[in-house]
Image (tube, rainbow, N blue to C red):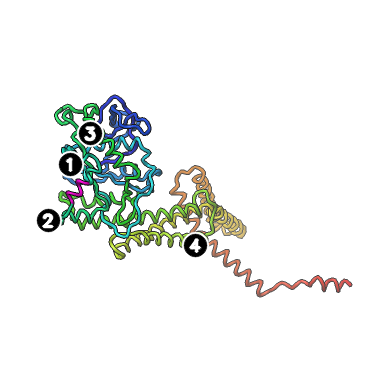
């Protein structure tokens, strides 16, 4: 499976590359050019050219591996990760023109401003599991019965899918099942591409060798498939899928395709429900993250811890409501663990925002040097007093502690200035914080309490009022 990383580059000397990326010099709103195009390998060009990007790797044991790096590079890029997805699948027998059709789709996408399309899917009260099914019939040989194109295809499909009483029960069930599974069913009839295409073993995709009738209908088919008004945004369980959500679906589905046998439908349903919930978690988490960035992000000033906690609780509740409001598969019980995962991830983000917010507090940043200065001052005073009264051992011990603290302070200042030995700086901060919390702060609190009790026990004499003083003077 492959996806496109960017628009194809132009080339006018090579034919259509089967299965590759395509591009041609086209006038605005014009038709297909007879000039060809190619795509180059990344090894040949120093500048990365357009080309298919393989996101599923088939191993020798026939298992599948998801190339998350390649997938994330496309779907999680800043420009498109929150945009909704349109899925276009081309299915058919081997060597029957799928790559040929995809080439022309890519040419049309290059010509159109493909990212500018409106929201087409409307809310429905009855949701079918699949959105759109198109039968593309090539080599149609009876245009006198049903004409080429969508109109003839629609009449042909109506006749083929009509349920009648004289049909076998299995045939009736197939027709009913198709109608019940797809929101929209259509058909397009294409003529034969010409004998030069069918009989020439060296056919390399040149448009001039293709029958004119085929090219004429091909020009109708591609806009009919890919024009903005024809596109259906990909939905699962009524939810529009964004590029960010599509990554979660890739991760979930790859797990059930690891074996050599096709997965059971129940496994696929389970994977869809898992991806559905993970996509809802990612959306809710991203909403919390964006709004917290607006409150206490990189360029925002320091916010009081109580206010930060209040905002966190409000946004957490909002994100949980957003998660619960998204239509999800699997039921309430299945979604509960994903709700717990969301709350856990939001709490982890909150811890990071607390640290980031504290780093903006100048007093918090100055705690370590202030603590070390206090230790130096206290040990200096104790060393002077004990040395004066003859307790040389204690004085020497205090001097040693003072020297080590001074060296620690200089080391911390160098780490802060240079950015080197950050792990050592973190240890110094932790020790200083513990020393402040366990010793210095308690001493300060005890001194403040003692001062308060002293003033209560021995209150200062009240000063005479101004009026009484004036009376005495008189």
Badge 1 density bin: few <14, some 14–19, many ≥20, Cα 10 Å:
few
* Residue 428 appears in view: no
What residue sits right under mark 2 in the picture?
170
Q: CA distance from mark 1 to mark 2?
A: 27 Å
- Local secondary structure at mark 3: helix
In the image, taking residue 343 as reference, residue 300 lies left or right, namely: right
- Is residue 7 rendered magenta in the image? no
Q: CA distance from mark 1 to mark 3?
A: 18 Å
Which numbered disc, 1 or 2, marks the residue that appears first in the sequence?
Answer: 1
Badge 2 density bin: few <14, some 14–19, many ≥20, Cα 10 Å:
few
The residue shown at (82%, 74%) is 468
Task: Mark 3 vs mark 2: give the one in front.
Answer: 3
Badge 3 density bin: few <14, some 14–19, many ≥20, Cα 10 Å:
some
Which residue range is magenta in the image?
Answer: 155-161
Q: CA distance from mark 3 to mark 2?
A: 35 Å
The residue shown at (22%, 44%) is 153
Which quadrant holds residue 20? top left
The residue shown at (63%, 68%) is 451
The circle on residue 315 is: none
What residue sits right under mark 3 in the picture?
214
């Amino acid at each position: 499976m492959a996806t496109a990383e960017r628009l194809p580059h132009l080339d006018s000397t090579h034919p259509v590359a089967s299965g590759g990326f395509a591009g041609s010099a086209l006038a605005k709103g014009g038709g297909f050019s007879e000039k060809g195009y190619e795509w180059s390998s990344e090894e040949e060009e120093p500048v990365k050219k357009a080309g298919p990007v393989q996101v599923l790797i088939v191993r020798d044991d026939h298992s599948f591996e998801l190339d998350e790096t390649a997938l994330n590079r496309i779907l999680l890029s800043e420009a498109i990760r929150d945009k909704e997805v349109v899925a276009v699948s081309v299915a058919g027998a081997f060597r029957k023109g799928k790559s040929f059709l995809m080439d022309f789709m890519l040419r049309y996408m290059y010509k159109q401003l493909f990212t500018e399309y409106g929201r087409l899917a409307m809310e429905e009260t009855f949701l079918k599991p699949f959105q759109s099914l198109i039968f593309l019939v090539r080599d149609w040989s009876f245009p006198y019965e049903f004409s080429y194109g969508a109109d003839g295809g629609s009449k042909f499909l109506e006749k083929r899918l009509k349920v009648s009483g004289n049909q076998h029960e299995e045939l009736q069930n197939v027709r009913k099942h198709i109608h019940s599974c797809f929101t929209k069913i259509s058909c397009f009839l294409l003529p034969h591409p010409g004998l030069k295409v069918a009989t020439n073993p060296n056919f390399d995709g040149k448009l001039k060798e293709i029958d004119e009738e085929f090219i004429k209908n091909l020009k109708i088919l591609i806009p009919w498939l890919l024009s903005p008004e024809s596109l259906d945004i990909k939905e699962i369980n009524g939810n529009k899928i964004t590029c960010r959500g599509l990554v979660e679906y890739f991760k979930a589905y790859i797990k059930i395709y690891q074996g050599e046998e096709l997965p059971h439908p129940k496994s696929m349903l389970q994977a869809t429900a898992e991806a559905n919930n993970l996509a809802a978690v990612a959306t809710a988490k991203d909403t919390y993250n964006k709004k917290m960035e607006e409150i206490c992000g990189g360029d925002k000033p320091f916010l009081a811890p109580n206010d930060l906690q209040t905002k966190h609780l409000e946004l957490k509740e909002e994100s949980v409501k957003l998660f619960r409001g998204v239509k999800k598969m699997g039921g309430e019980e299945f979604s509960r663990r994903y709700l717990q995962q969301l709350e856990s991830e939001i709490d982890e983000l909150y811890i990071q925002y607390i640290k980031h917010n504290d780093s903006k507090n100048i007093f918090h940043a100055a705690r370590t040097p202030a603590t070390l200065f206090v230790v130096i001052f206290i040990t200096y005073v104790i060393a002077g007093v004990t040395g004066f009264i003859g307790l040389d051992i204690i004085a020497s011990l205090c001097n040693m502690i003072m020297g080590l603290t001074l060296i620690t302070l200089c080391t911390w200042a160098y780490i802060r200035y240079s950015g080197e030995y950050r792990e050592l700086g973190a240890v110094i901060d932790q020790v200083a914080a513990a020393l402040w919390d366990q010793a210095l702060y308690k001493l300060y609190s005890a001194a403040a309490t003692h001062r308060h009790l002293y003033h209560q026990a021995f209150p200062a004499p009240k000063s005479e009022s101004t009026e009484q003083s004036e009376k005495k003077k008189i």
